[in-house]
Amino acid sequence: MRILIIEDDPMVAMIHQEYVKRLDEKYDVKHVKTLKEAKRELENYLFDIVLLDNYLPDGQGVSFLEHCKGLAVIMITAANDSMTVKTALSSGIVDYLVKPFVFERFSQAIEKAKVYCGLLSKEKISQDNIDKYFNFEKETITLDSLPKGLAKITLAKVIAQILTHQSGFTTQEIADELDISRITIKKYLNYLVDVEALLEDVNYLTLGRPVSIYTIKNMDILENL
């Protein structure tokens, strides 16, 4: 799966790339900052999915949609005016995300784009194929078994520590409190976001990398893991 990110803000583009790689390390991701660069990439290389901002240095993303025919385009932008949204939808995008957004919503958009790509790859399309796209629902993640590399005892410690926080918390805070590496804690928090126990939001700092802030989304799921 080849993904083209059209985004002029390097911090936002980095978040997109991190989210994509979290979904699948094998995804081939290319980032450009302008519509001119994007046009050149699309003319020379094949892509499956396009993540398109609207406000770019050399124009608006919606005006570029005519160059993206046959591709699964996800608009990811701060533009929430009705005209922009209507134009994007009428041009055939598969999804529209308004910044800021959470990882689970991003994941859903990518999965929907993959279903769209699957439709286009078929010679004949059944009603079931069409229904799967138009009635798309995020695949339910089973809670019976943990992903490879995660341990139940460590998960229990992470959850117990999360429950001591009355408001949002960061990966670094949980890592420091449990004296466990930040990388390890990040894996557990990613899992808890995937099973919809936590919400992840991104805090765009003036300096440095954006910071993920986590809050409890579903206490029942969290307490029963």
Image: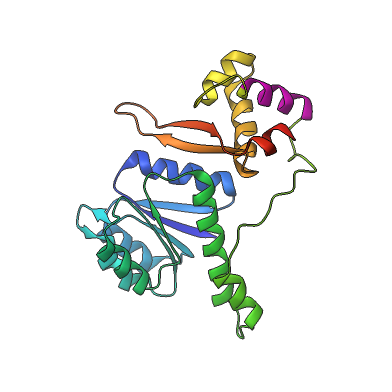
> Which residue is the extreme one toward the bottom?
124
Report the side of 36 relative to 10 (left or right). Answer: left
The image shows residue 130, relative to residue 210, as above or below, that is below
Q: In front: 49, or 87?
A: 87
The stretch of residues the image draws in magenta is 152-161
The image shows residue 173, relative to residue 211, as above or below, that is above
Where is residue 202 drawn, in percent x and y?
43, 36
The image shows residue 151, relative to residue 17, as above or below, that is above
Report the side of 48 relative to 189 (left or right). Answer: left
Q: In front: 178, or 123?
A: 178
Where is residue 4 drawn, in percent x and y?
42, 57
Q: Within the magenta stretch, is there residue 155?
A: yes
Which residue is located at x 46 percent, y 37 percent?
A: 201
Q: In front: 144, or 67?
A: 144
Q: Name the main secondary structure of what is drawn in magenta.
A: helix
Which residue is located at x 76 percent, y 30 percent?
A: 151
Where is residue 13 drawn, in percent x and y?
38, 45
